[in-house]
Amino acid sequence: VEGFPCILVMEQDITSLKTTEFELIAAQSAQQDFFAAISHELRTPLNGIIGLTESLLQIGERNPSEIKTLKVIKSSGVRLSQLVN
């Protein structure tokens, strides 16, 4: 078509790509909601464990073995709490 202006048009059906994109976005949102809920459910008892352990370390007399065990419980709780946050 010499001498005439031409426009080249290319079409491609992207319906399946868009469907997959929307499914991926929905899955990511569900994953974030799940981890937020689990994080909350773990933080509450962990804070209780840490707090009670601190109280047990402060009140009463403890033998060295009990103190060591309570410190391990507390440090483990703190470490888990950091992972959850």
Image (cartoon, rainbow, N blue to C red):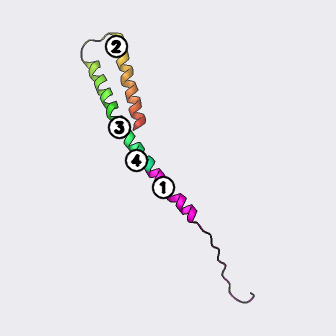
Foreground residue among 54 and 28: 28
Q: Residue 5 placed where, x, y %?
A: 68, 87
Report which residue position mark 1 lands on. 25
* Range of residues picked out in magenta: 1-29
Q: Residue 26 placed where, x, y %?
A: 46, 54
How far is the residue under mark 3 from the one under mark 4? Answer: 12 Å
Report which residue position mark 3 lands on. 41
Foreground: disc 4 or disc 2: 4
Residue at 75% in and 88% down: 2
Report which residue position mark 4 lands on. 33
Q: Neighbour class for label 2 at 10 Å: few (<14), some, many (≥20)?
A: few
Q: Residue type at mark 2? A: Glu
Local SS, label 3: helix
Sequence order check, earlier mark of 3 and 2: 3
Q: Quadrant of residue 36?
A: top left
Sequence order check, earlier mark of 3 and 4: 4
Report which residue position mark 2 lands on. 66
Sequence order check, earlier mark of 1 and 2: 1
Q: Are marks 1 and 2 in contact (CB under 8 Å)?
A: no
Q: Residue 78 placed where, x, y %?
A: 38, 29
Looking at this rendering, what residue extends furthest in the left direction?
59
Q: Are marks 3 and 1 in contact (CB under 8 Å)?
A: no
Image quadrant in which the N terminus is located? bottom right
- In this rendering, the answer to whether 56 lies above or below 35 is above
- In this rendering, the answer to whether 62 lies above or below 1 is above
Residue 20 is left or right of residue 51, and the answer is right
